């Protein structure tokens, strides 16, 4: 069934997660890093009058790699249901450590609100999609809106508040993820954490789980966590703990375990990837109706 809400002009806007729409894909400059690298934004815009619900996609890659293309299958599937999806590049840890990419994401939310109407998107109620380390960044942005550490890149007239967050295998506890990498002797993930968290103590300051454990004031937006059963990168037990902590703190968290799935299952076509896309669309629909 379509989900109805009101846009800023008062006209009824319906989102049907089962819709099948043509999309147009384009790219525009997003921002330039301190070291001069041009970051790009990839826009997946449904064809039609709009305005369409709008989400910002934050890529994974252990903070050290990947870009706006990382989540393309999911972005295309969600956009084809009538959602404006914009995926951005972010600063990589080798260029600058935490919180540089979180600052990119904070700016990205504000930038998207300022630009959404150009692509027939609704700037009200922007949501986030985040995968792995992108899920970690999405959780931080949502839990700490208007944070002075994250809001360093100026853009007047907009804030970085979001309406909801959908994640796949988010690194909700970076420290226990690092411990798991040490246990498995996964040199790439060990080095990724050490490159990103400088000074090392930042691994605790930037932990969504430790934000909850320490009872830090936090905004708890509706959260979807999709987790692979066979993920040995981010353990299901850690995600279950975070979901339980989130609910105990008063937040709404939908936790879904995907049987037979590893860490990056949505990168490959298949039943689990299809199920994940349908789940994200249904999650968006519920939060538009809220």
Image (cartoon, rainbow, N blue to C red):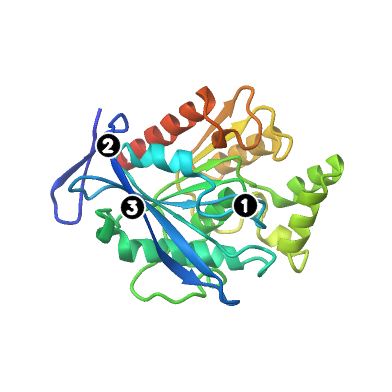
N-terminal label among 1 and 2 = 2
User: Taking 43 as reference, is 88 left or right?
Assistant: right
Query: Residue 45: x and y, percent?
Result: 31, 49
Q: Residue at x 58, y 64 (%)?
A: 101
Which of the two labelled residues, at mark 3 and mark 2, occupies the earlier sequence position? 2
Above or below, 158 against 10 in this view is below
Disc ID at residue 208:
1
Crowd rating for badge 2 (residues with CA inside 10 Å; few <14, some 14–19, many 20+):
some
- Where does label 3 land, which residue? 125
51 over 106 or under it: above or below: above
Kind of element beneath mark 1: helix
Q: Position of residue 130 (x, y in %)?
A: 52, 48
Image quadrant containing the N terminus: top left
Q: Give me the C-alpha separation between circle 3 and circle 2.
A: 21 Å
Q: Nearer the viewer, mark 3 or mark 2?
A: 2
Residue 15 lies, in percent from the top left, at 26, 38
Q: CA distance from mark 1 to mark 3?
A: 22 Å
State the residue position of label 2.
21
**Residue 46 falls in which quadrant of the image?**
top left
In three-dimensional space, the C-alpha distance between marks 1 and 2, rounded to whole angstroms, equals 36 Å
The answer to whether the residues at label 1 and label 2 have Cβ atoms under 8 Å apart is no
Q: Residue sitting at 51 percent across and 22 percent down?
A: 271
């Amino acid at each position: 069934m379509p989900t109805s809400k009101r846009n800023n002009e008062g006209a009824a806007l319906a989102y049907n997660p089962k819709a099948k729409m043509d999309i147009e894909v384009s790219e525009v400059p997003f921002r330039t890093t301190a070291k001069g690298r041009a970051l790009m934004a990839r826009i997946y815009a449904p064809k039609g009058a709009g305005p369409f619900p709008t989400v910002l996609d934050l890529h994974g890659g252990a903070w050290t790699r990947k870009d706006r293309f990382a989540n393309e299958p999911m972005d295309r599937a969600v956009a084809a249901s009538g959602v404006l999806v914009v995926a951005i590049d972010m600063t990589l840890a080798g260029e600058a450590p935490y919180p540089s990419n979180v600052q990119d994401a904070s700016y990205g939310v504000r930038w998207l609100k300022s630009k959404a109407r150009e692509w027939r998107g609704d700037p009200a109620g922007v949501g986030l999609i985040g995968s792995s380390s992108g899920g970690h960044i999405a959780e931080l942005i949502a839990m700490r809106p208007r944070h002075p550490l994250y809001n360093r890149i100026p853009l007047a007239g907009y804030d970085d508040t979001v309406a909801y967050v959908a994640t796949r295998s988010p690194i909700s506890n970076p420290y226990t993820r690092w411990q798991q990498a040490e246990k498995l002797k996964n040199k790439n993930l060990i080095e990724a954490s050490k490159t990103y968290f400088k000074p090392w103590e930042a691994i605790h300051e930037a932990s969504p789980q430790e934000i909850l454990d320490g009872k830090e004031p936090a905004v708890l937006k509706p959260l979807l966590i999709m987790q692979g059963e066979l993920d040995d990168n981010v353990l299901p037990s850690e995600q279950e703990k975070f979901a339980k902590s989130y609910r105990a703190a008063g937040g709404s968290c939908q936790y879904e375990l995907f049987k037979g799935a590893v860490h990056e299952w949505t990168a490959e076509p298949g039943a689990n990837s299809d199920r994940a896309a349908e789940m994200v669309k249904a999650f968006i629909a519920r939060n538009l109706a809220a």
